Image (spheres, rainbow, N blue to C red):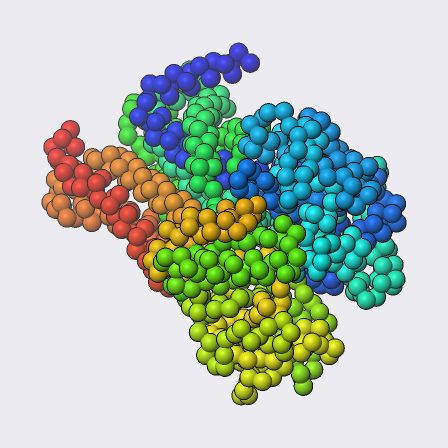
Amino acid sequence: MKSFWQDVRYGARALWKSPGFTLVAALSIALGIGANAAISSLVNATLLRRLPVAEPERLAFVFSGTQGGLYSTTSYPDYVDFRDRSEVFEGLAARGGISASLGAGDGADLVAGSIVSGNYFEVLGVPAARGRVLTPEDDRTPGAHPVVVLSHGFWQRRFGGAEVVGREVNLNGQSFTVVGVLPAEYTGVDLGRADDIYVPMSMQAVMRPPRGGYSGEMNPDLLKVRGNRWLWMVGRLKPNVEPEQAQAAVAVVSKQLDQSYPDTNTDRTVTLTRAGEGDPQSRASLVSVARLLLSVVGIVLLIACANVANLLLARASGRRREMALRLALGASRWRIVRQLLTESVLLALLGGAAGLMLALWAIDLMKAAPPPPGALPIAPVFTVDVRVLGFTLALSALTGVLFGLAPALQASRPDLVPALKDETVSLDRGRRFSLRGLLVVAQVALSLVLLVGAGLFLRSVRHARAIDPGFDAERLLVAQLNINLLRYTRAQGREFYRQVVERVGSLPGVESVSLTRNVALTGGASTRGLLIEGQTGDGNDLRSDGAGASSPSSNNTVGVNVIGLNYFKTFGVPVVRGRDFGASDAEEGPGVVVVNEAFAARHFAGQDPLGKRLSFNGARGPWREIVGVARDSKYYTLGEARTPFVYLPLAQNHETGMALVVRAGGEPAALAASVRREVQSIEKNLPLTDARPMTEVLGAALYAARTGAALVTGFGLLALVLAAVGLYGVMAYTVARRTREVGIRMALGAQRRDVLRLVLREALALVACGVALGLAGAWAASRLLAGFLYGVSTTDPLTFLGTTAVLVAAALLAVLVPARRATKVDPMVALR
């Protein structure tokens, strides 16, 4: 231990005596470590966090779905059967996502939350920080227990940490009593989701209103409808029960439900996953992104390590005499290696500390500029915990060994006699490529891989921006009208929509107003099974509504949207054949639809679709006549292929979760305050906080692509700078080492251009090898980017050629300085 502390003290003094070297090396390490720590923090907090519940390893999600379909939700009656028939769980709870209108004086706020079974917190093992959590007693009688539990974050934001237990709050127009506040560390069990409020399942009639509006004063009881699937299940396994056993047990229950309820449960499956792994579909998409980012920052760290290793090799050449003296005085080679590795690790820890500061700064920047609503499938978590700190420390130490080992081994075996005489002898004599040269080749190759990736992402974003969404977004303003939260009857809903359209349409600067169930490119989607009159197909109602639904892919499945009058005029989507919906298309009139060009091409190739009829409920109908064909546009994502789509008139398909669409004569953002004022003058309890221009929606759709391009480009440029510095360093070292040789050449008649050519040839040989390896690596790695690109081939020749040219130009600039220095060598000075 004593010798270890001697090594540490000596290493610290050695680094202190070389401030220039220490600063450059530590900065290189800091950039590499900082990039890794920042991305690792994001991945850890979002994907790898330990669930804030008791014994999280015993917690499991139970997903119900169709054969070969997505992991999905279940109905309340199915949940009860799984809860009561499965003997592998200590408890099985259910949760449904909700949005609620929280009364706030003269206005209302929109809050996110969950409606949960009474045993939810008991199953999770989460106590209350203040008051109590929900209990099974709160969930026995429908409508009898209007109580609510608040998350700690919401309590702090909304109530400033004041005492709230026992306080009344207004949710969806009804008074609820706050009975508890959750601990600060509990942020939910779902990946990237944080709820503000939790209410018992017994309050479903108030907190989960129907999309189609109330037919009367009472809400249909979703707790009794087996076919309405809206709940997620989470269970706590009994001790010593493995997930495989639990999977087999719930599969038996699923089979029993299939046999007992063939109308609603035919061919349904059930899948059990550990709760810490989240929804496998969502996790799979996020893991691919995480792998990409971690690979990029890993390459940056390797380049930084190669750079520092080159610096250490150069420094070792200046310490040859010191190492020779130590060996001559009896020091073992292992003792020399240990001393040099200690210096390397100290340098790495210094760089790691600086890198952690850079990572914290980067995380603060990400917190200050969070992604816009709807830009990502989940909300990323920006935080640093003990695991990230430990990872940074371990990575720093490993980095020190990684870049310090080769220089230490080489420096510990100098030729004693020449070294003691202080003669200039190359550490790498006799080799075609020195170790320093090989490190430069590796830097160039890895830099080119990152630059090609950055180039592909930049061209992808450029292509995405050029994609025509099929509608005119420049002068559109959209705002969600969540009147379903206020328990409107259908008659009240229709009257509200009529007043909103009329009053907003009369505002100065408004050209047109309409309504839509799903705003394009926001992630909301509806798909339904389809039967066309006279054609064979599946007539079952395959409706799938809600955020995250994927675009339809089978011939008998189609995307659907419910729209108000003047929708096509407001959105700037022309009706190319037939007509738009009109006032005559009323509820009591014949059912009508408008289809898009892709629908007409798929189902009526070479025929006139007008007058044809279709049904979403099989042969039993009702049948709806096609009265128009609209131009294709983008519905789900900007990168989607041509998608068949059907529009339904709001008058015949009443929905209570519509969005307002306003076409402005000028800047749409300028109308937001006026629109909000008019809407809330009709209904003050309606939360309207998200009125925003459609261009922001497009920006959110491009956020992931733009952010990915910015990150990869930034890391690519960082890698380029590090590679250029490394190339400069090795050529400067080479020129200094060959000063006498250059002097002799010039004394024997060599011209300056000959010397310049000699140095450039040696440098370009390293660059050429690095470029060759880099192009091969980029060609292989680019295949992994196919799922992240818009309209760009992974082998785009322009990108490969352009990035190669940039890299070669940077390399030439880095080499010119030492090359020009070589041409200015005085032969007499060099010979002396």
Decide: is 63 above or below 69: above
- Residue located at (51% from left, 44% from top): 294
- Residue located at (59% from left, 53% from top): 483
Q: Is residue 99 left or right of residue 639?
A: right
Decide: is 414 above or below 538: above
Q: Quadrant of residue 32 in the image?
A: top left
- Residue located at (69% from left, 76% from top): 622
Q: Is residue 600 left or right of residue 173?
A: left
Decide: is 692 above or below 634: above
- Pick whichever, 374 or 22, lies toward us: 374
Question: Is residue 375 among what the camera can see?
Answer: no
- Pick whichever, 350 or 637, lies toward us: 637
For the C terminus, the quadrant is top left
- Pick whichever, 294 or 711, lies toward us: 711
Q: Is residue 702 left or right of residue 487?
A: left
Q: Whole-percent x and y of residue 406?
A: 45, 34
Q: Whole-percent x and y of residue 236?
A: 79, 40
Q: Quadrant of residue 528 in the image?
A: bottom right
- Pick whichever, 15 or 138, lies toward us: 138
Question: Is residue 334 among what the camera can see?
Answer: yes
Decide: is 396 above or below 795: above
Q: Quadrant of residue 92 in the image?
A: top right
- Residue located at (30% from left, 37% from top): 729
For the N terminus, the quadrant is top right
Q: Whole-percent x and y of residue 131?
A: 71, 27
Report how many numbered discs are placed on residues in the image: 0
Q: Whole-percent x and y of residue 351?
A: 42, 28
